[in-house]
Image (spheres, rainbow, N blue to C red):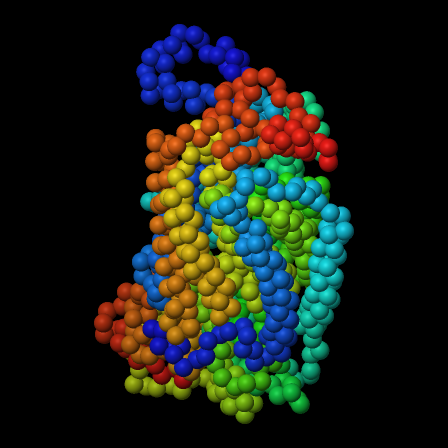
Amino acid sequence: MGDSNSKIPVSSVFDPVSTPAHEINVIALFSIGITAVIFVIVGGLLTYAIVRFRRHPDDDDREPPQVYGSNPIEFAWTTVPVLIVLVLFLTTARTIYQVQAPTRPPDAISVRVIAHQWWWEFRYPDLGIVTANELHVPLSDRQSPTPTFLALESADVAHSFWVPRLAGKTDVIPNRKNEMWIDPHVAGTYLGQCAEYCGTEHGLMLLRVIVEPRADFDRWVAAQKQPPAVDASVAHGRQIFESTACVNCHTIQGTAAVGRFGPDLTHLMTRVTIGAGVAMNTRDHLRVWVDDPNVMKPGALMPAMNLGDKDLDDLVAYLATLH
Amino acid sequence: MAGSIDHEIPLSATEDLQSLPVLGKLHEWVVTVDHKRLGIMYIAGGLVFFLVAGLQAATIRLQLAFPDGNIVSPQVFNRLMTVHGTAMVFLVGMPILTGFFNYLVPLMVGARDLAFPRLNAFGFWLWLFGSLLLYFSYIAGDGLYGAGSAPDVGWFAYAPLTELPFSRGNSTDYWILSILLTSVGTTATAINLIATAFCMRCEGMTLNKMPVLVWLAIVVAFMMIVALPPLSAAQAMLLADRFLGAHFFDTQAGGSAILWQHFFWIFGHPEVYILVIPAFAFASEIIPVFSRKVIFGYSVMVAASCGIAFISMSVWAHHMFSVGMTPAGNSFFAASSMMVGVPTGIKIFNWLGTMWGGKLRFQVPMLFSLAFLFQFLIAGLTGIMLAVAPFDWQTTDTYFVVAHFHYVLVGAIVFMIFAAIYYWFPKVTGRMLSEKLGQWHFWLFLIGFHMTFDTMHFSGLRGMPRRIYTYQPGRGLETLNLIESIGALVQGIGVLFFVINVLRSLRSGDIAGNDPWDAWTLEWSTTSPPPEYNFATPPVVRSRRPLWDLKHPEDPDWKYE
């Protein structure tokens, strides 16, 4: 199932493509530099002491001179660290304010991120779009930036939204509204996942962010606003969907299904993965998933549907038309 | 003290029991109020839980050795990581370290026991009961809902995952009660240590002449008294939420998830220092003896420890940089967290100053102590990186943090626990541990430690969050995780050498004598093991190193202090 990642670069925090991640990368390298110098000096002194002052085999067994301490030396090795801390603190505070107090241009994109056990709901209030697990955002170029501002909410327990190449993580906490922002300037797919332990399937609460040039993004938005095409050949599958418990949790626009407990399926087939990234969105995987989600994602809150083979085929055939 | 307990038990009952050799011995240990026996029981109990929780860690590493791992289910994995973390802190670190203080503080101040021997026994049995409750949850945790299950909410148990809608059954209740009980036991020990160090020092031992270890025991005890009540209060509130319909942390009824985090970490961060300052204490006794030099900057060492204790009370929210605090809040906690690095650095420099110009002997206690110095240096430096709040936004809740705190908890604390065991085992048992097996133990554990925990920094920086039960292939994590798991195996083999060494030496180790390391503090002036009353006549001291004065009458310490 992991073939889904094979063409996507590693999500290294040192490979930023968005301003918050970039700012963090700069101060990360700065602090690593400072600490590396400290390590070389102190580690070098320790090594020197160990080698130089080891007891020689022909030692005369007399005790070495006893030195009880030295106030000037103590003063020196207190002052120097204090100065280092001061410099590091000032640069840290600068970056904190830069990342946490951004200016919001008028054409910024707003997204409500609602974390659930164990998937992500994305709602674009200004565009009237709802999707899940795969966040689409436009490329932001430096001349006319179109950053995306995320309002983070949780439907149940504490989660954390983390896409390492775009920004540091921000926790998603019930009964609290958090905010973060990204302005990716390289198109591509970026992997992330929930970073705060949130129960059984915390490990597979994956997410991906798809960054596209503005024209592609607008095309995607337009497509998401359309209701899915009605296909008479899958009417039986649709009828199964509408007459079983599916509708309690899922929404498909233009049908009786208006549930909000699970992901909106209106444009299911425009998503690359299913089950919050657990598998590629192929017909075979979809069939396994609908039959019993626990096979792919043990503990997932969606129950096994217990349909017969024929009904299952028809239902999957219907879902496969939801472009 | 020994006399008083005999009066409590009807004479006939004791005689009956003593006629049965095994039961009689057991009975002696159960009714004992002797600080040495209680200390040994703390340490032995802690080591047993160390092996159990270590095996749980090994299972975690087995599961994560390969992507899409399928050794255990996510449910089992989450219980493993929760119980591993909880046990290593409350059932392993705390009892072993308080066990050492129990054993050593009265001996080092020349007293016959702790100030309140019965309170001491009470604390131990509370701790043991609490500890057993945690593992008993494996049998009973699911309560009336079905078969057993252990807590699966993570060792810091963030709300509202612990609330009834998300945690049914009783596993979370076992977690709460276990920690409540062990915390009460620990508080009792803390009071006892303070009273002993302040009131029961032998003639001539002013505060300024106490061994560094005793000073640090006082510091740790005060930190326990300050840090544990918020934890206990939070546990009580959580119990009220779960059983009495309160809503402290119940977000569905307007409670606050963040409140739990503040309560937990205002305990949790001082707790790190409660665990690591005893490691400093061991290092401050062992490094001088094996360098053949007096500790460099005694009063600065003590002052730095007090400084750490104070500052560590105001750094807790650096565990919460990602919860969405204001920039001002984040800046404050970044500053305080960096500041705590200063006194910590001073301690490393003073150990360096102690070794400088000495004649270093590389026996096993010193090997572990030297590895501790390097590893604690690295742990401190990654700690500084984590205090840089923006860097923390990337690294918190990832394997980078897992690497950092295992560098502290294993690289510093477990290494110093091993050093302390090799150093004081001869005093406690009268027999030496094997130097050769000890070398095997040290080198295997060292290599395994670095294989596992060095690599974890990099898996964290490559986007691997902590507490995930599996990861998909193709994310650049396969090689790192495999090395980490092999390292866990190597550490396990190292610990096996340690277990063999202890069992072998208990039966047939070389006889230690009173003072095998040619050391300077009071515990080495009495027999090994010490008699129940510790010292036949109360000792009188004139300096911080009374045995140095005895061995070097021409050049005693008290001339210089």
* Residue toward you, B321 or B554: B554
Along the viewing direction, whichever of A310 and A161 lies nearer the viewer: A161
Q: Residue furthest left?
A: A309
- Rendered residue at 65%/87% (across/down): A142
Task: Specify the quadrant of the image occupied by residue A22.
Answer: bottom right
Left or right of B284? Residue A264 is left
Q: Residue B377, can we see it?
A: no
On the image, the x and y values in percent for residue A152 come to 58, 68
Between B18 and A180, the residue placed more toward the observer is: B18
Q: Is residue A309 visible?
A: yes
- Residue at 31 percent of width and 58 percent of height: B71
Residue B283 picture location, percent across and down: 57, 44
Query: Is B400 on the left-hand or right-hand side of B330?
Result: left
Q: Tell me residue B97's x, y (percent).
A: 53, 38
Instruction: Name the quadrant containing residue B235.
Output: top right
Left or right position of B482 against B343 = left
B150 or A174, nearer to the observer: B150
Q: Position of residue A270 (x, y in %)?
A: 42, 82
Q: Is residue A90 left or right of residue B424?
A: right
Quadrant showing the C terminus of chain A = bottom left
Which residue does the image show at 42% across and 73% down from the upper left?
B475
Above or below: residue A37 compared with residue B134: below
